[in-house]
Amino acid sequence: MNPTTLDLFADSEPEQQSRREQIGEQSYVLRGFALPWLERLLPALEAVLAAAPFRQMVTPGGFTMSAAMSSCGTWGWTTDRSGYRYTRHDPRTDAPWPEMPPVFFELAQAAALEAGFADFVPDSCLINRYIPGAKMSLHQDKDEASYAAPIVSVSLGLPAMFLFGGFERGDKSQRVPVFHGDIVVWGGVDRLRYHGVLPIKEGQHPRLGEQRINFTFRTAQ
Ligand code: SIN
Ligand code: FE2
């Protein structure tokens, strides 16, 4: 084979499933990474939500969050007038949070690895549901016992503008559009970066309808 033939072969290799965009020193957007998992993810999501339905929670300041939430895994993230915390039980039912479906765990671990974080063992998956107009104000994820593990954040359904900020609330944020199947991973030196989501625009997603679903995987304990 001459070099020209080799080049032809190189060009005919299938496109990589996912593009990786760096948005911080240890932060990446993995474009479309969740898409090949979707047919396993959605039924697993349905089962989790049947056991622990979405509900809107109240912040310590008394505001009702616009995103509705549920959780699976050992630890579920909750908020009420007395504060933010991880609990082992769903406060709505007092039952343990649904187990994290294996497909959730595998996806989170694969995405973390793709972003350079080996051996991610999430014990918590917060599930956020945004309808048009819902948003998430800039915040840090800091209710975890250690910041050694990254955050793995999966976007499904309607697109969103993800805000990826600095280490102070007032720092300028990057605007990162996130689409169905994208995963944002941040950790290491970027673990405590502020982040949030601008109000979701009106729209209909062919698969998920008028909503955006986000999974946020963390090691809580
Ligand atoms: C979160 O920070 O809990 C959610 C972020 C997102 O919905 O993309
Ligand atoms: Fe967060």
Image: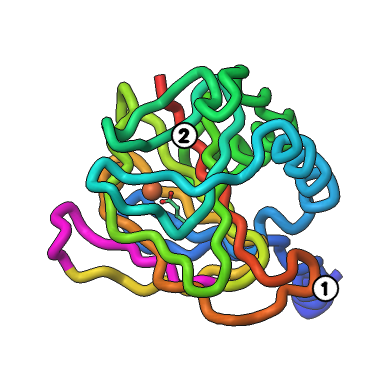
Residue 124 shows in this picture? yes
Residue 55, percent across and down? Answer: 55, 45
- Dot 1, crowdedness within 10 Å: few (<14), some or many (≥20)? few
Residue 119 shows in this picture? no
Secondary structure found at label 2: strand
Residue 197, percent across and down? Answer: 41, 65
Q: Disc 1 or 2, which lies upstream in sequence?
A: 1
Q: Residue at x 71, y 63 (%)?
A: 16
Residue 193, percent across and down? Answer: 26, 51
Q: Residue at x 66, y 56 (%)?
A: 33
Q: How is the image coloured?
A: rainbow
Q: On the rendered structure, is 184 left or right of 58?
A: right
Name the mark nearer the viewer: 1 or 2.
2
Which quadrant would residue 18 be assigned to in this image? bottom right
Q: Nearer the viewer, residue 55 or 37?
A: 55
Image quarter of the N terminus? bottom right
Q: Nearer the viewer, residue 184 or 48?
A: 48
Q: Which residue is mark 1?
A: 12
Q: Which residues are magenta?
A: 160-171
Which quadrant would residue 165 be assigned to in this image? bottom left
Q: Residue at x 40, y 31 (%)?
A: 149
Residue 58, percent across and down? Answer: 37, 45
Q: Nearer the viewer, residue 128 or 53?
A: 53
Q: Nearer the viewer, residue 25 or 99?
A: 99
Image: 216 above or below 144: below
Q: Which residue is mark 2?
A: 218
Image: 206 above or below 147: below
Image: 97 above or below 193: above
Specify the amino acid type for callout 2: Arg
Specify the amino acid type for callout 1: Ser
Image quarter of the C terminus? top left
Q: CA distance from mark 1 to mark 2?
A: 38 Å
